Amino acid sequence: MVTAQTPTNIAVIKYWGKRDETLILPVNDSISLTLDPSHLCTTTTVAVSSAFHQDRMWLNAKEISLSGGRFQSCLREIRARACDVEDENKGIKITKEDWAKLHLHIASYNNFPTAAGLASSAAGFACLAYALGKLMNVKEDESQLSAIARQGSGSACRSLFGGFVKWIMGKEDNGSDSLAVQLADEKHWDDLVIVIAVKETSSTSGMCESVETSLLLQHRAKEIVPKRILQMEEAIKNRDFASFSQLTCADSNQFHAVCLDTSPPIFYMNDTSHRIISIAEKWNRSEEAPQVAYTFDAGPNAVLIARNRKAATSLIQRLLYYFPPNSDDLSSYIIGDKSIAK
Ligand code: 2P0
């Protein structure tokens, strides 16, 4: 039995659009920040026993089906790489061949609301790939494991590393070079404070419709993101918050512009999201240098990245002023090592 814990990640240069739906190969590179595991993480225990008669999985204590192609791809890829496991003290001996016949039980738990649109699949599949890899004594490194997690959910490949992570889109048709690499570890830029303003809702993925119908997506993938990736790598390397903030906000806004350019249009942000953008933009313009970056994924929750603790304190004061905890606009704030729930 093995237990692993994996945090979720937030993209600052977004992944939106696949060139291969089955292998989950993206149309552009993306860059993310992996969050502190104390809040948004998945804990997964994987167990093997000759007493198990089929593969089974529980998510937040409720059994879920493993029949989907994404789960099956991850299980197949990990099993194909399984190695002998031997522990004389515990009397365990499982050979490479045994793994093909043995069944697994998987129990996964998210410490955040699955329906809050906070990329639970990213942490979930990363954790599954990592835990299975450990259980089956897979020798692959994190980048190679990330290519397996990717087949569960694209953004999952970026959660195999802490700090700043790049998902390289790759060129191969079989996806072997579409994997994550760490750009900088979690200590590299530790002034940053992340605040997530949560509005609970469920979201659906419209990525496929965007690829089919948005001309802006084509332009973004070919002309905009490649340059932005280089600029973002430079900003991270130099801890240049002004560039980091400008690129993060611009990329979030362009991702939502692609959603709007999709037929039928997709609206992930709501009025509260728009108000938060206005507050952040106004604040950044009133200071000598930007104090906060904002980014929104496939849902209305704001992920706000403050340049340092002082800016984070000021940000939280502003949020509490505009969205008091007894208003209906936001259900909770997740801040560094604390949550303020309504
Ligand atoms: C991202 N998102 O880069 C982008 C930005 C949402 C907006 O990755 O189909 O759940 O499982 O590969 O990973 C959400 O998409 O999609 C996502 P699949 P996933 O974080």
Image (cartoon, grey):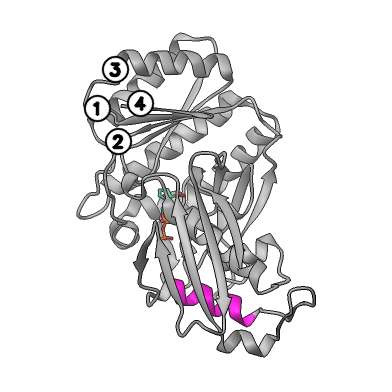
Mark 4 or mark 3, which has the lower sequence index? 4
Which quadrant of the render holds ligand 1?
bottom left
Q: Earlier in the sequence, mark 3 or mark 1?
A: 3
| 4 or 2: tag closer to the N-terminus | 2
Determine the secondary structure under disc 3: loop
The verdict on residue 79 being magenta is yes
Q: Which residues are magenta?
A: 71-80
Asked if ligand 1 lies within 8 A of label 4, the reply is: no
x and y, in percent, of residue 165 in the image? 61, 47
In terms of sequence position, does the residue under pointer 2 or pointer 1 come before the other? 2
Q: Is mark 3 within 8 Å of ligand 1?
A: no
Mark 3 neighbour class, 10 Å CA radius: few under 14, some 14 to 19, many 20 or more: some
What amino acid type is highlighted by mark number 1?
A: Asp
What secondary structure is the magenta-colored segment mainly?
helix
The residue at which mark 1 appears reads as 329
Q: Is residue 335 among what the camera can see?
A: yes
**Residue 324's mark?**
3
Front one among 154 and 20: 154
The answer to whether residue 155 is seen in the rendering is no
